[in-house]
Amino acid sequence: MLSRIEEDQKLVKQILTGNTKAYAKLFTRYKDAIYFLILKIVINKNDAEDLTYETFDKVLRNIEQYNFKFAFSTWLFRIAENTCIDFLRKRKNNHVSIENNNDDNVEFAIGEDSIQSSVLNPEEVMISEQQIIFVQNLLEQLKPKYRKLIELRYFKDYSYEEIACELEMPVGTVKTLLHRAKLRLGKLITQ
């Protein structure tokens, strides 16, 4: 059985031969992780979504530059980070920093017709905090073994093999237990 790194490299080789389904598989595998990485950096959902697609566009255009000595995910995350850096540099040139008495900096984008705040508004902050609390409460209702599996797979982005090593169990068992964990989580969400 191939490791995640080997699977990724196999897909890259297929992409190099023009296989668009292989590209779709890599996109599906990494799009959420890239989106959340970018969201942490730019703190704007619309920008994060746009930059996620821009990252994958750059990957496709530059796939022949990928070095097989390294994990594909390392290369992909580096492209995402560089895409964010470029975006922030461009945005910085169009921002004015306003300092208030509390030494808090608030940035405003200067557009053609209006000024928009790049800081989350109170409603967005509250919704985000409520979503985090909701997910944490759902996870707390799972058995510890299921909670651990969900955390390793979806929050730490471990492969099945990495989870199997961490928990000292066969990969097949990991997949089965993870499937059960997702079913239980799904039932909790719909209650």
Image: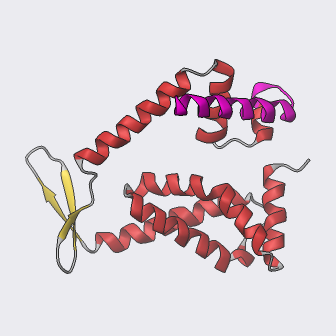
Location of residue 150 by image quarter? top right
Location of residue 63 by image quarter? bottom right
Q: Is residue 179 left or right of residue 6?
A: left
Q: Is residue 112 left or right of residue 65?
A: left
Give the residue drawn at x 65%, y 80%: 61
Placement of 95 over or under 146, stated as above or below: below
Where does the image place residue 158, in percent across and percent down from the top left? 69, 41
Task: Verify whether residue 187 appears in magenta.
Answer: yes
Q: Is residue 129 left or right of residue 153?
A: left
Placement of 56 over or under 170, stated as above or below: below
Q: Nearer the viewer, residue 49 or 86?
A: 49
Task: Verify whether residue 70 appears in magenta.
Answer: no
Give the residue drawn at x 80%, y 77%: 16
Give the residue drawn at x 7%, y 46%: 101
Give the residue drawn at x 55%, y 63%: 80
Where does the image place residue 132, in percent across and percent down from the top left? 43, 35
Span of residues in magenta = 166-191
Where does the image place residue 19, in percent across and percent down from the top left? 80, 75
Give the residue at the far right of this rendering.
Answer: 1
State the predominant SS element of the stretch in magenta. Answer: helix
